Image (tube, rainbow, N blue to C red):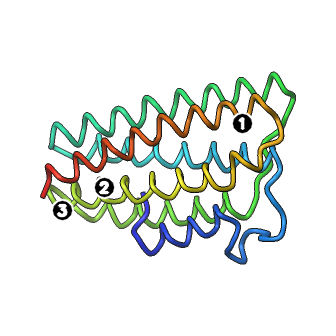
Amino acid sequence: MLTRPIAALAALCLLGVAPLAQAADKPSDPQIAHIAYTAGVIDVEAGKQAIAKSKNKDVVAFAQDMVRDHEAVNVQALDLLKKLKVTPEDNDTSRALIQAAAAERDKLAKLDGAAFDRAYVENEVAYHKQVNGALETLLIPSASNAELKSLLKTGLKIFQGHEQHAEHVAAELK
């Protein structure tokens, strides 16, 4: 996931404020689809890393939930896009998220034990806060297609639950 400074940069990108995103334009449905899908893939990859590295049963269970839920939402998103004949459009925001996530995975790879667990879960809290904020303030309001908007709203509800779950696990690790 993302460290707080990188999460802040990614959030700015998601919110369209950073120079990497076109702040004057709201994202198109194909761009929204790509951003949302990318955010899900990033959390799946982080979850898989945690499953492989952590020895803490609560952290592993949380990571398994993240993998399962984000993969399921991404399958639904791909099915919807196929139905609508929409091709996700790569964009600067998605590329910035991918780059930040790769750096964070590298950082987490160097940690072990409780240090890894705390860093992973803290980043999950920060990541879900940022993604949920972007969904609420930019992606959902910008979506033109009603079915895409509905899927994003469903995802937001699921991901708000993830944020609360991550906060609970983080509190247990302290």
Looking at the image, residue 159 lies above or below residue 18: above
Disc 2 target residue: 120
In contact (CB < 8 Å): disc 3 and disc 1: no
Frontmost of labels 3 and 1 is 1
Q: Quadrant of the C terminus?
A: bottom left
Q: Secondary structure at mark 2?
A: helix
Q: Which amino acid does the dot numbered 2 rest on?
A: Tyr
The kind of residue tagged 1 is: Lys
Q: Earlier in the sequence, mark 2 or mark 1?
A: 2
Q: Residue at x 57, y 31 (%)?
A: 154
Tell me the residue that label 1 is attached to.
Answer: 149
Q: Is residue 125 above or below residue 65?
A: below
Q: Tell which of 63 and 24 is nearer to you.
A: 24
Task: Looking at this view, name the residue that lies furthest to the right.
Answer: 85
In primary-sequence order, the first of circles 3 and 2 is 3
Q: Which residue is mark 3?
A: 115
